């Protein structure tokens, strides 16, 4: 899963005193801030305002409070019984093809915390699961998902070309996935191309608002989700230009989110620790053929969640190291 354009500016950059940002995010970014927490936050910030004393700083302070409200409007993240979160990239597809019901069932069996799925829409507006915008790589057919009706898509089969297997799997609908995962495993929804209202309606139909986080691929998607389903927890990738704690605070001011993603190698220690202090988890992508070589470094750096192509192996590694 790659961010649509990590260099794209999501909102206006705001210059501000780092101390004020830290005070606000550290004390207020948690859900349901109390009056006591608000007082704890405002006291040092008001002192800073007194020192600066200009309208630009006052305006910034107001922006920070708005940012706090936007963060707290989102639901808390789905609860997990594990202290280290494992996300199965496109399902647990070590033995079966990606983004199939079988891959999600394997993830459930292996006690994975989340399955990452890719949402697209057929020509006749049926929500289906497919990573690529075409069916060429994964099925015995050809064409764009958006150019095929669901009836046409249903006649195709997902096949494991890498293993040269003859076994066939149907292309799952979003509803199929919700039925499979409900009350069994959380969903990391990589929102590729779909109607927000229809997607959210389907989520509510199965009562799974507290089981899903939404990964955003474009600014328009962020706007639509905030408008139609403001309480849903949203996730963005860490932009390439975020290298310091101050960079991160500016980014979060422009685009409040509940969670951060991105490539594991894009994070500096300073950025990760700043994210921890703001109460916003970072669960980066680490999937690669040699990803196991990086697990120890990622854990030592401070990550407490990873998206992987080898969820069962990662879970076994975590167990051996007392993290599961």
Image (tube, rainbow, N blue to C red):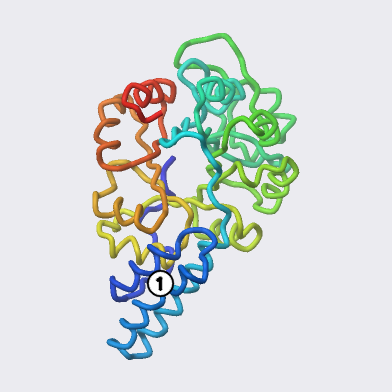
Quarter of the image where one finds residue 210: top right
Q: Which residue is drawn at the image coordinates 61% and 15% (left, top)? A: 168
Q: Which residue is drawn at the image coordinates 41% and 62% (left, top)? A: 252
Q: Quadrant of the C terminus?
A: top left
Name the foreground residue: 95 vs 109. 109
Q: Position of residue 35 (x, y in %)?
A: 51, 71
Name the foreground residue: 59 vs 317. 317
Please say if 264 is above or below 135.
Answer: below
Q: Position of residue 297 (x, y in %)?
A: 24, 35
Q: Which residue is drawn at the image coordinates 68% and 33% (left, top)? A: 173
Q: Quadrant of the N terminus?
A: top left
Residue found at the very far bottom of the displayed protein: 54
- Dot 1: element: helix
Q: Position of residue 311 (x, y in %)?
A: 43, 25
| Residue 315 placement, left or right of 301 | right
Which residue is under mark 1?
41
Q: Which residue is drawn at the image coordinates 51% and 47% (left, top)? A: 215
């Amino acid at each position: 899963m790659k961010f649509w354009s990590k260099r794209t500016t999501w909102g206006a950059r705001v210059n501000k005193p780092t101390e004020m940002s830290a005070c606000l995010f550290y004390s207020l970014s948690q859900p349901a801030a109390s009056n006591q927490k608000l007082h704890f936050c405002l006291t040092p910030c008001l002192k800073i305002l007194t020192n600066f004393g200009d309208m630009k700083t006052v305006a910034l302070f107001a922006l920070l409070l708005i940012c706090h409200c936007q963060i707290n409007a989102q639901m808390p993240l789905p609860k997990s019984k594990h202290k280290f979160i494992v996300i199965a990239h496109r399902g647990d597809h070590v033995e079966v093809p990606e983004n199939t019901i079988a891959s999600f069932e394997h993830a459930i069996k292996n006690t994975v915390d989340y399955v990452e799925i890719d949402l697209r829409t057929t020509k006749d507006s049926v929500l289906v699961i497919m990573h690529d915008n075409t069916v060429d790589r994964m099925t015995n057919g050809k064409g764009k998902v958006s150019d095929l009706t669901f009836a046409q898509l249903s006649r195709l089969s997902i096949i494991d070309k890498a293993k040269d297997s003859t076994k066939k799997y149907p292309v799952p609908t979003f509803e199929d996935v919700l039925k499979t995962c409900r009350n069994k495993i959380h969903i990391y929804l990589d929102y590729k191309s779909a109607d927000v209202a229809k997607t959210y309606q389907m989520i509510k139909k199965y009562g799974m608002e507290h089981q899903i986080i939404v990964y955003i691929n474009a600014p328009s998607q962020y706007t639509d989700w905030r408008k139609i389903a403001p309480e849903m927890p949203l996730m963005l990738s860490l932009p390439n230009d975020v290298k310091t704690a101050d960079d991160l605070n500016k980014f979060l001011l422009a685009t409040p989110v509940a969670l951060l993603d991105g490539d594991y190698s894009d994070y500096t220690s300073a950025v990760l620790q700043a994210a921890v202090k703001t109460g916003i988890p970072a669960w980066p992508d680490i999937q690669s053929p040699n990803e196991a070589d990086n697990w120890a470094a990622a854990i030592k750096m401070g990550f407490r969640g990873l998206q992987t192509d080898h969820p069962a192996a990662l879970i076994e590694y975590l167990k051996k190291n007392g993290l599961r």
